[in-house]
Image: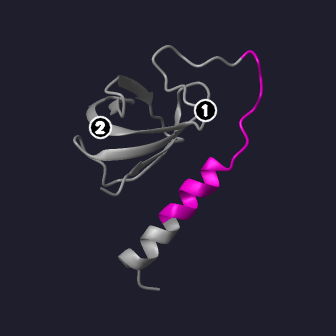
C-alpha cells in the first residue's frame, strides 16, 4: 500500500478522535499539576515555543505559556518542531497522550 497525504490525514483524524473518545477516570485523588492545561475537553492547542527534555513549552490561545509533559508513552508526530502549531490530548495529570502537528 502506498502512503500518501490522502491516507495520512484521515488516519491522523481517526487517531485524534479515538484518543479524544477515551474515558477519563473520575478519581477524585487525581489533580491536575500546576501549570497543566485545565480545559474540560483535555485538548491543548497552541504554538510550540520550546522543547526542554521531556517537556514542551506551548503558548495557548490565551497567550499563557503551558508546560506539557511528554514521555515514551506519548504518541508524537515526528514532524513537530519549535514554532509549529500543535494539538495535544492531555490527561488529567498534565501528561500528553498525543501531540500532533495542527493544520494551519
**Residue 64 relative to residue 1: left or right:** left
**Residue 103 location, x and y as percent?**
34, 57
- Of tags 1 and 2, the one toward the viewer is 1
Reading the image, the residue beneath label 2 is 48
Q: Verify whether residue 15 appears in magenta.
A: yes
Q: Mark 1 and 2 residues: CB-CB less than 8 Å, in contact?
A: no
Q: Is residue 9 above or below residue 15?
A: below
Quadrant location of the C terminus? Answer: bottom left
Whole-number angstrom distance, CA of label 1 to CA of label 2: 21 Å
Secondary structure beneath label 1? loop
Q: Which mark is residue 40?
A: 1
Extreme residue toward the left, this view: 83
Q: Which residues are magenta?
A: 12-29
**Residue 97 location, x and y as percent?**
54, 41
* Identity of the residue drawn at 30% across and 39% down: 47
Give residue 49's quadrant in the image: top left
**Residue 90 relative to residue 83: left or right:** right
**Residue 68 location, x and y as percent?**
43, 29
* First reached walking from the N terminus: tag 1 or tag 2: 1
* Identity of the residue drawn at 58% across and 19% down: 32
Secondary structure beneath label 2? strand
Amino acid at each position: 500500500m502506498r502512503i500518501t497525504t490522502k491516507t495520512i490525514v484521515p488516519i491522523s483524524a481517526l487517531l485524534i478522535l479515538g484518543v479524544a473518545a477515551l474515558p477519563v477516570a473520575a478519581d477524585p485523588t487525581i489533580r491536575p499539576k500546576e501549570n497543566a492545561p485545565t480545559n474540560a475537553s483535555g485538548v491543548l492547542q497552541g504554538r510550540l515555543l520550546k522543547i526542554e527534555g521531556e517537556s514542551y513549552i506551548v503558548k495557548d490561545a490565551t497567550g499563557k505559556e503551558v508546560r506539557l509533559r511528554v514521555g515514551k508513552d506519548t504518541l508524537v508526530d515526528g514532524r513537530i518542531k519549535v514554532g509549529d502549531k500543535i494539538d495535544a490530548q492531555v490527561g488529567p495529570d498534565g501528561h500528553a497522550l498525543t501531540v500532533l502537528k495542527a493544520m494551519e
